[in-house]
Amino acid sequence: MQTRLRRATRLMRVQDRMRQRAEQELAGLERRVQAADTAQADLIRALNEASAFHEPLRATALHRLKSLAVTAQALRAERDVSAQQLLDRATQHKRTENWVDRLEAEHRRHREKQDWAERLDLLSAAAAPVASLPPAKPANGADEPDRPATAPRPVDPEDRTGHGPTHPDTSAP
C-alpha cells in the first residue's frame, strides 16, 4: 500500500511539472500571437500613411502583411490546440490528485486499524491471566469422573422406576 501511495504522489508531481511546462508554452504562444497582431497593426498603419511615391515599398509591405496574417492564424490554431491539451492535462492532474487523496485516506485508515489492533492485543494480553469466569470445559479433562465404557443393556419394565411415565399394559383381555 505504501508503494502505491509513493508511486501515485510521484505521478502527481510529474503531471504537475508537465502542466506547468504546458502553461509556459501556452504563454509563449500567446506572446507570439500578440507580437504577430502588433506587427500586422503596425504594417497596416504604415501602409495607410504611405504616399503614392512608395509603391515598391507598398508591394513588399502587402506581401509581408499576408505572411503575418498566415503566421498569426497558424499561431492561433496552435494556441487553441495547446490550450485544449493544457485543459486535458489539468483534468488528468485533478483525477490523479483525487486518486492520491483516496490512497492517503486508505493508508491512514489502514494504519489506524493496525494501531487499534495492536492496542487491543496489548489489552487482551494483559487481561488474559485474570478471567471473570472459569472455563466451561476443563482443558485436560482430569476434573471429570471416569465413566465406564460399557454397552447399554436392555431395560426390563420392572426396572424402569423413576425413568419417566410408564404406560399400562392393554394387551390382556
Image (spheres, rainbow, N blue to C red):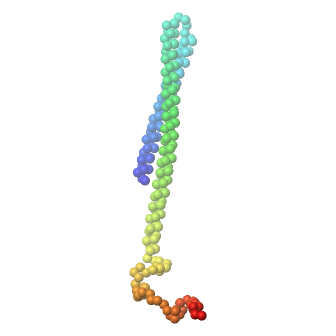
How many marks do you count on the picture? 0
Residue at 51% from the left image edge and 33% from the top image edge: 84
User: Image quadrant of residue 165?
Assistant: bottom right
**Residue 31 visible to the viewer:** no
- Residue sitting nearer the eye, 40 or 50: 40
Residue at 41% from the left image edge and 82% from the top image edge: 141
Q: Does 4 sit above or below residue 88?
A: below
Image quarter of the C terminus: bottom right
Residue 132, image x, y percentages: 49, 78
Residue 161, image x, y percentages: 53, 93
Residue at 51% from the left image edge and 47% from the top image edge: 98
- Residue sitting nearer the eye, 58 or 101: 101
Q: Does 55 sit above or below residue 19?
A: above
Q: Does 43 sit above or below residue 160?
A: above
Q: Residue furthest front?
A: 173
Residue 128, image x, y percentages: 44, 74
- Residue sitting nearer the eye, 135 or 77: 135
